[in-house]
Image: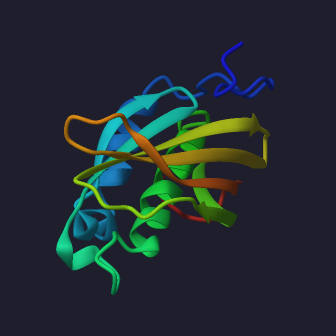
Amino acid sequence: MDSRRPDSPHSQPQDPDFRARVERSFARQPFMQTLGAKLARVEPGLVEVALAFDESLTQQHGFLHAGAIASALDSACGYAALTLMPAEAAVLTVEYKVNLLAPARGPRFSAVGAVKRAGATIMVCTGDVFEKPDGEARKLVATMTTTVMVVRDRGLAD
């Protein structure tokens, strides 16, 4: 079994329209628009968010800020979880831990979130951010473990 794929009873999409639902929800996030983040891939239990290097998102040493990296990765993990949730449920991150492994120099980044354990109420996801330098092999710059909650009956959209 692919180690990125969950192996629980909830590991298959419960909403046949999950791709469009993720796309609609992502489009409603002004913060992702501010970061310039784009959805690159949406599969059951796996979402990739693309992020381009932007000087306005750097820290004092000129690297992409950890907050931008963590935000893109949090969205990738949360949306990976949403792909497996029922149509009436929404996703909410309740905890995450990020390890920054290397300076993020760019020019492009890929944040990939995957569901590790899909439960009825809580899902655990992992994610990695890869730097994609032009003409070079990708480099791992950050990794994350996150816990997300399946939210029902609280009036939250996607």
User: Which is nearer the eye, 105 or 85?
Assistant: 105
Percent coordinates x, y for residue 138 in the rendering: 38, 38
Percent coordinates x, y for residue 110 in the rendering: 37, 45
- Up-down: is 149 above or below 15? below
Can residue 44 be seen by looking at this rendering? yes
Quarter of the image where one finds residue 36: bottom left
Of all residues, the one furthest to the top in this rendering is 1
Percent coordinates x, y for residue 66 in the rendering: 46, 72
Percent coordinates x, y for residue 106 in the rendering: 27, 56
Side of 93 relative to 59 (left or right): right
- Up-down: is 27 above or below 133? below
Side of 148 relative to 74 (left or right): right
Side of 122 relative to 91 (left or right): right
Tally of numbered tags: 0
- Up-down: is 120 above or below 25? above
Residue appearing at x 72%, y 27% in the figure:
6
